[in-house]
Image: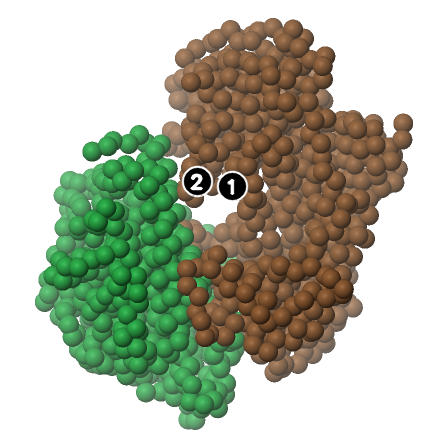
Amino acid sequence: MSRRGVIVGVDVGGTFTDLFLLDLSAGRFLTAKVPSRRGDEAQGFVNGLNALGGAAEIATIVHGTTVGTNTLLERRGPKIGVITTSGFRDVLEMRRRDRRRTWGLWGDFIPIADRDMRVEVNERTLADGRVRVPIDPAEVQTAAAHLLDKGAVSVALIFINAYANAANERQAVAALRAMWPNEFVTASHEVLSEIREFERSSTAAINAYLQPVVASYLGKLEAALTSQRFPGQLHIVQSNGGIMSTAIARRLPARTALSGPAAGVVAGVAIAKASGFDDLITCDLGGTSFDVSVISGGKVSVAAQTTIDFGLVIRTPMIEITTIGAGGGSIASVDRGGLLQVGPESAGSVPGPVCYGQGNSHPTLTDAQVVLGRINPARPLGGELKSLDVDAAELAIAKHIGEPLGLDTTAAAAAIVKVADARMAGAIRLVSIERGHDPARFVAIPFGGGGALHVCALIRQIGLKNALVPRFPGITSALGCVLADLRHDLVQTLNVVLDGLDDAGIERRMRAAGEQASSVISGAGIAVERIDVQYELDMHYVGQTHTIPVPLPVVMRDGSFGMSEALVQSAFEAAYLGSFSRLLPGLAMRIVSLRVAAIGRRPAFDFSVFAPGPAASLDKAEIGSRQVWFDGGWRDTAVWSRLELPVGATVSGPAILEQPDATTVIEPGFAARIDRLGNLIVEPVR
Amino acid sequence: MTTLDPVTLAVLNGRLVQIADEMDATLYRSAFNPIIAEAHDACHGIYHAATGATLVQGTSGLPIFVGAMAFAVKAVIDKVERDGDLAPGDTYLFNDPYAGGTHLNDFRLVRPLMRGGRVFAWIASVGHWLDIGGNVPGNYNPKATESFQEGVRIPPVKLIRARIIQQDIIDILAANSRVPQSNWGDLNGQINALDLGERRLHELLDESGDDTIAAAFAALSSRAEALMRANIAALPDGTYSYDDFLDNDGVTDAPLRIALDLTIAGDRMTLDFSRSARPCEGPLNIARSTAIASCYVALKHIFIDVPANAGCLVPIEFNIPDTTLLAVSAPRPVAGYTETILRVIDVIFGAFSKAAPERAQGSPFATINALSLAGWREQRQRWIMFCFFGGGLGGNPESDGLNHSNNPISTATIPPVEILESLYPVMFTQWALRPDSGGPGRNRGGLGAIYEIEALADDGADVFLIGERGKYPPFGVNGGKAAALNRFTHETDQGAKNPPLVSKVTDIRIRRGQKVRLETPGGGGFGDPAMREPDRVLRDVRLGYISPEAARRDYKVALNSDGSLDTGATTKARAKP
């Protein structure tokens, strides 16, 4: 069998590594789910590829990773140094003078670079770009030597006003690279050439913090792939949902912060769209976290910057995703106040839930699901374990939850699930209801290993219209890796007044930037149908500090975009009226920066390959029944093999639908129907 | 009246708050002066048709405005009652501090949301304009003894009539500001916000029904009241007193007492400020509405779970007589109102620390350091850089105080150095944490900051400052110590100088190349500093948060010359009573 054109999406989560293989020429696909290896993710990755038949004939691997986010959230990164302009070493720690919450003054902040690891050098550029104090490369090298001496592995160079003129930063970074013992050197203008020193500093420092982590991770991965005789290319999903090369991921790891979750959103949107839904909420429940994103009118919300945690700002375009620490591996406990808590601590996949029998004795959400009969103990996820230890799960829940709360084991397990449901519903509310979206308009797309276990509770608690459980909920993010377009973004500060615009000059810059971004895409070595280049200006009235994005309605014709003052003005005014009710005639307009995005469009995916075949039938799908606990008591519950259910089949709750990568629970009062693409539509019975 | 199930109520609350949030965001993005655009010194909300009481507030608006806006809307309601004549889209504008304003820079726009010819609710916008005349560019005149020296006072006037802006009023405003274009841009931003709020609210009413939304307003308010009562009832009955002082009023160098007797009786609370100083000559007075708004801010910081609407004030009784500086009327000057309300908030925190020591917190830095640098560009064009600065928060039961944060009255982020330098002829030479500024404590107060600014313009710059805490530092609680004092220094041809009134500055000009320097207070400490774990003290020294001298003096921790712990000396020092 030829594997030319075989592409594999790999999503490495905290608990499981999910894989989706698409063989375009043969029109077939394979899926796999294996345990992640915390600290040795490459091994889980290779195990997954082996489960698909090995790496030797795969052309392309696209990878979604949470290495970056986890490093930041858990502050597990290396010791980094910062070299900055004299007088400004505390920018990173002073933030924008904010606090954690509007109301309430408690809590402190620990920056990712300690104060004694931030050193100043004598240099200064003014706001208009003039260099007031030139840089002394020797001083930079002395500062760097000092940081190395104190154990810095990576370094960020951040000069005030480098957005206006990066000359000092360029000279300094050259001197730095000449003596720094590794490639982990980040200069702020290389990461973000935009005004606002804190946002640029934070992005640059986070980049420095992640560089060694991501490089070591990718290094191990590439070595493992080489040893598996992988002949193709490895790519990484960015936080904006587009794909980039590993070379860029090493250079700009700050762009990978939401890599894995972004892939899930990409898949969720594509799946919903194919089934005719435009308003959706993706709900990704993995082993350690629950990630939610709202898509209204088919449009993914992209934020210009994200706060990963208080004071940790990354300014680069990202899909808006809200994360809470609740997953299948989340540990349930009773706190000192007698309150039942689920998460944020997680047992991961090693040791994993108590029922895995790998040494953890603290009950998890998964243990509760097992005790309630919702997860089949004979068919654990991930394929490594033969069966789950129900007795051990019961014992742990009785001891840690039942006894302190005075509940029997079943009631204690039910309480764990209820608390987890409420936390997830809270996260969904935050992004939907609390932002004014009416949930009755939205379909939930639950996925990840555990999403479909909670589908009815989420519909019920939030008042959602219904839910669509994808054909392969457990590997949805891996599917997203295969579906994602390639994308490369560039920003340049122009700072010119519109009046008297140099048409030819701006055309030249657009052309150059467009070519540069396109070449990154075409050089990535992954098949695309076409490359779209989008041009946008950030503009404002002179005197404003914020800008609005002004998409330029231009195409290249006979080597020209047809740029003119009038064209830009009318585009600006249209965009301004889209955001605000009043234009300010007579005031001068300014172009602050040029943004160029090159998007390599991937071939459209035909979801009908997922549709159940003609052989599927209710008879084949019927497995039997078992006792499952629902609100009110144990119920004799039908168990179905999900993938054998034919198109149009309807299953009424209570019911359990099993498949290798996930379990779907249909509560009493709900029904599920298979749509023409094999998705499961879950609705309350009215 | 319609009763709503909890889920519907939650959805509607979310949509209403979203409308106010979008109004906030619209103004931030379209404003001209960085105090609104970058520092978010603005607020939007939805208010009761008949009383003006706050119904819904944006989450990002300035806390102090949240409390004050209700009084502003009431002033407009009174005006409409007198004048009659109200049509959809009519918009009132004013900055009168004595009619529900705060100080003259804060311009309020109030518009009715009309349904079927009747006012259903009011929507309002407030934003801090850069300059509105008066003796001092930026209006922070520390020497003002009458409102007239602070700027132009506009009572509620109808700016938009039958959807048409009254150009006459715009012309009067423009003629009375040093930066009319900046004000014009900000005014348009506020109108953008009101237009958006009006449109969104009509959409919601059309969709959900007027009765349903009215029921939601009522339910949200009674929920806030019930929660506030429950919080008060959980505190031990009794009277708790706390006094603190302002440095001076900017005119006479004499301290001003702010005194509170806080009484808990069952589920009610009385805040009695009648022992406070008399109205002062300088601009440290506030109107009674502003005083109540600041009480609201303090209580919301203590009882975090109570929703932000008028219901939470129902169980509170106020005694703020007009014999004090906390309830003045025109034309007493009020430009420095931020300093006075911060002290009002401090004494509430102080009294509360006696009622519930386990939830006490050290005083925050509690001065905004309103600094204006002003001068002329080429062709006699005015420039005014106005900025207020950060400091440390108090140590608390959970953690050390946050370094370099904003005040309880504000969520304003500080404008970036790069934005300020791109707009004004100044260069910052330092923007740093200030060592030894946090109050010592088992949980230390957060650090204040050092800001140093050099004038780049040929003419240099005129300098004005209204600050506080130059003589009375932010206090500690439960044995925690006070933070460092606020300090302002300016270069002169004769060397560096500190102003005679410490925290109030006027009539100073620095030349090109000379600097001003602000060193802001940290927060007060929480608990006995000698109880702080030596490891944490060592870390503070290593990071330069505190000096080795302070470690020895305040924390009784002795260090060896290599920075390690001198165990013997430390044990001995800590054993002394």
Question: The N terminus of chain B is located in which quarter?
Answer: top left
Question: The residue under label 2 is which amino acid type?
Answer: His
Q: Nearer the viewer, residue A663 or A497?
A: A497
Q: Residue at x 76, y 65 (%)?
A: A559
Tally of numbered discs = 2
Residues at circles 1 and 2 in contact by the CB criterion of under 8 Å: yes
Figure colour of chain A: brown
- Real-space Cα separation, disc 1 to disc 2, in angstroms: 9 Å
Please rate how many residues cluster around mark 1, counting C-alpha atoms within 10 Å: few if below 14, some from 14 to 19, many from 20.
some
Q: Residue at x 60, y 37 (%)?
A: A269
Residue matched to label 2: A437
Residue matched to label 1: A296
Among the chains pictured, the one given green colouring is B
| Circle 2: element type | loop
| Circle 1: element type | strand
Question: The residue under label 1 is which amino acid type?
Answer: Ser
